[in-house]
Image (spheres, rainbow, N blue to C red):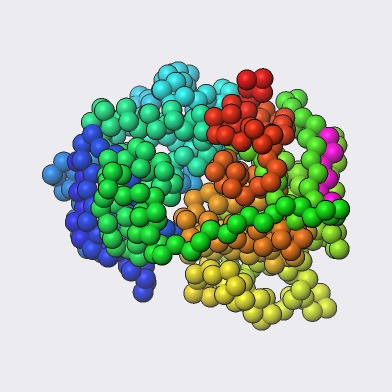
């Protein structure tokens, strides 16, 4: 169906793709694995026409594909769902879907589009937002689901999915993987870009591994276990850190949340949330996006006022007692058109560190940024590089660096490893564990149950704005999936 030969692409002096060969057959799911910066996204952008390669060719069912033209790729039958949602914030979800293939008539009928979308959504196992709701009001998970609908509305022969499962609960994941199998059964080619090795092995017919812009392996799930795939992606694996995160006896309370509630337009988003977090502890909140997590994080960050209730973070310096790592690094975490040192200076405690009599010491800010790049292993040309020039993994490292360099006593991390490869995820986990072992407290909010089960001593579930504590007997994916779906009594 789709075949690429000797695809090569440079970005300045960086060789992003080095004579890459790739193929996807009709009725086949191909998983594309590789760490951040391996070239996966660049290759996908070649297929979708967003990037023109320096050399090489792509054919679709034997016919040459016009490279460098998104319109040509879409018309040929290649559709993609990107890792970062590509939707218009001020448009309603129906208007965003109108930009897909739901309605080709000159006069757009939003009601007809909504009806077709709801019918298609049934096959995906999820619900659509209320009528005429804008994208700005929707969660990350809802945005990704809408992108899947829009991509499928074009009836593509090749569907590319970049990290699509990071926002799905366990009970949604199986339905989504079943959808991919149905698409395969219809004769389509599905390319699944993922870091989740278990998912790749569960659903893929073939696996292609990229490393440093080159194809280092083509294999099948039957011929490779997770350890083998991980070594192919990143080389020899470092041992995973053991989570030494048991709270110290009589330890200091770092964060108290007392009956916190939030209403928006009369709708209860957070319903009397209460939580206590002690020094040396990592507590987790599991939940499907859109159940109040984003609003909770914004209230803790001071970006939104609670309707009732209160919270208190305890630290030596109240101004830097709590730091937040938001889930969307591109929209909420960083300003992509600003330089790296400028992004660090967005944190008031870091500005104060290099200020001289009310004036910002730019040389000192640059030196602080150079220290951050080295300490947190951020791959960048230097402090003057734009945040937009970094890969997704390095942007995430910059966010984590800015939060930890403030020396907070409480760290709120929201989907902090979403979209990161194995090595980057291990780095972030190590930093969180070190922070907790030094007396900090971490509130880890995530839709990744594996991460929460591995990293936390206490686990809560949030659903429809309500928080439920779990017992050790609840710590199995099926039970937690039911709780995340709001089925408390089962």
Residue 435, image x, y percentages: 70, 61
Residue appearing at x 49%, y 69% in the figure: 379
Residue 48, image x, y percentages: 32, 47
Nearer to me, 340 or 74:
340
Looking at the image, the residue that sits furthest to the left is 62
**Do we see residue 226 in this rendering?**
yes
Q: Is residue 125 magenta?
A: no
| Horizontal relation, residue 320 to residue 193: left or right | right
User: What span is in magenta?
Assistant: 253-259
Residue 464, image x, y percentages: 67, 28
Residue appearing at x 55%, y 52% in the figure: 417
Nearer to me, 70 or 42:
42
Q: Quadrant of the C terminus?
A: top right
Q: Is residue 257 magenta?
A: yes
Residue 359 against residue 163 in the figure, above or below: below
| Horizontal relation, residue 252 to residue 290: left or right | right
Residue appearing at x 59%, y 48% in the figure: 454
Q: Quadrant of the N terminus?
A: top left
Q: How many marks?
A: 0
Nearer to me, 304 or 249:
249
Nearer to me, 432 or 291:
432
Residue appearing at x 29%, y 51% in the figure: 208
């Amino acid at each position: 169906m789709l075949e690429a030969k000797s695809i090569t692409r440079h970005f300045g002096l960086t060789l992003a793709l080095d004579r890459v060969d790739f193929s996807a057959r009709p009725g086949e799911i191909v998983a594309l694995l590789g760490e951040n910066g391996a070239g996966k996204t660049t290759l996908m952008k070649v297929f979708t026409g967003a990037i023109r390669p320096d050399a090489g060719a792509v054919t679709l069912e034997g016919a040459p594909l016009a490279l460098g033209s998104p319109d040509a790729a879409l018309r040929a039958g290649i559709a993609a769902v990107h890792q970062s949602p590509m939707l218009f914030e001020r448009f309603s979800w129906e208007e965003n879907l109108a930009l897909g293939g739901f309605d080709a008539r000159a006069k757009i009928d939003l009601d007809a589009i909504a009806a077709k979308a709801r019918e298609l959504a049934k096959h995906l196992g999820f619900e659509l937002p209320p009528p005429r709701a804008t994208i700005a009001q929707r969660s990350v998970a809802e945005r990704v689901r809408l992108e899947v609908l829009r991509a499928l509305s074009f009836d593509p022969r090749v569907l590319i999915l970049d990290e699509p499962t990071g926002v799905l609960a366990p009970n949604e994941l199986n339905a989504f993987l079943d959808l991919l199998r149905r698409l395969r059964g219809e004769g389509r080619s599905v390319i699944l870009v993922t870091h989740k090795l278990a998912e790749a092995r569960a659903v893929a017919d073939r696996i292609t591994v990229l490393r440093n812009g080159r194809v280092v392996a083509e294999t099948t799930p039957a011929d490779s276990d997770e350890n083998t795939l991980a070594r192919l992606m990143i080389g020899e694996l470092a041992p995973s850190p053991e989570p030494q995160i048991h709270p110290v006896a009589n330890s200091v309370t770092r964060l108290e949340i007392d009956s916190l509630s939030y209403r928006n337009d009369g709708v209860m988003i957070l319903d009397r949330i209460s939580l206590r977090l002690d020094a040396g502890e990592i507590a987790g909140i599991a939940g499907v996006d859109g159940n109040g997590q984003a609003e909770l994080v914004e209230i803790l960050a001071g970006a939104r006022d609670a309707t009732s209730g209160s919270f208190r973070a305890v630290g030596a310096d109240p101004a830097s007692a709590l730091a937040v790592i938001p889930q969307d690094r591109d929209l909420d975490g960083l300003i992509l058109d600003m330089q790296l040192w400028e992004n660090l200076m967005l944190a008031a405690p870091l500005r104060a560190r290099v200020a001289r009599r009310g004036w910002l010491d730019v040389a000192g800010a640059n030196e602080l940024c150079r220290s951050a790049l080295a300490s947190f292993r951020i791959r960048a040309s230097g402090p003057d590089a734009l945040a937009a020039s970094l890969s997704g993994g390095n942007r995430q490292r910059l966010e984590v660096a800015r939060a930890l360099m403030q020396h907070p006593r409480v760290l709120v991390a929201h989907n902090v490893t979403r979209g990161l490869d194995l090595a980057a995820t291990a780095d972030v986990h190590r930093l969180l564990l070190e922070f907790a072992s030094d007396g900090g407290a971490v509130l880890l909010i995530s839709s990744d149950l594996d991460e929460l089960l591995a990293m936390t001593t206490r686990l809560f579930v949030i659903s429809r704005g309500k928080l439920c504590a779990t017992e050790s007997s609840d710590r199995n994916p099926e039970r937690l999936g039911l709780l995340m779906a709001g089925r408390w009594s089962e």
